[in-house]
Image: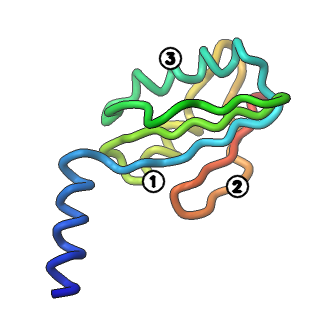
Amino acid sequence: RFSSQVLARWAKEVQNGRALRLIADNVAYADLTALKKVLREFRGFVEFVGQDKFQGKTATITVRTKLTPDQFRERLSEAKVGKKKVEIGMVSGAVTAITLK
């Protein structure tokens, strides 16, 4: 029974994508908008989940994607937001923290 539940969940993630949380530190609201535009262009992007959080200079975005977390982070690390490069500072399960430099 447990193995069938795990397989069903995995199949659902493969078909519908998995939710990954992205925390961007030291960003302006304009950077958040530009970052979301870059994420929409990722192959495997499905949708943004829930509402973004933006407080101070920290933004939290939840993205549903068909990419694995490692594939998502690899694309993220190669991306440019405006003229800024994405620098990954922390990875923990489905959570990735970045700064733009």
Q: Residue 5 versus residue 72: which sits nearer the camera?
A: 5
Judging by the rendered image, the residue that carries numbered circle 3 is: 37
Q: Residues within 10 Å of mark 2 (few under 14, many from 20)?
A: few
Horizontal side of residue 17 vs 11, given as left or right: right
- 11 over 52 or under it: above or below: below
What residue is disc 2 on?
90
x then y, percent, for residue 83: 70, 14
Q: CA distance from mark 3 to mark 1?
A: 19 Å
- Dot 1 amino acid type: Pro
Point 78% across, 36% down: residue: 25
- State left or right for residue 40 relative to residue 66: right
* Contact (Cβ within 8 Å) of mark 2 with mark 1: no
- Mark pair 2, 1: CA separation: 13 Å
Colouring chosen for the image of the structure? rainbow
Q: Extreme bottom residue here?
A: 1
Please, what secondary structure does the residue beneath circle 2 have?
strand
Q: Position of residue 66 (x, y in %)?
A: 30, 44
Secondary element under disc 1, as helix, strand or loop, is: helix
Q: Tell me the SS state at disc 3.
A: helix
The picture places residue 82, in percent across and down from the top left corner, at: 65, 13
Q: Which badge, 3 or 2, is on the more N-terminal residue?
A: 3
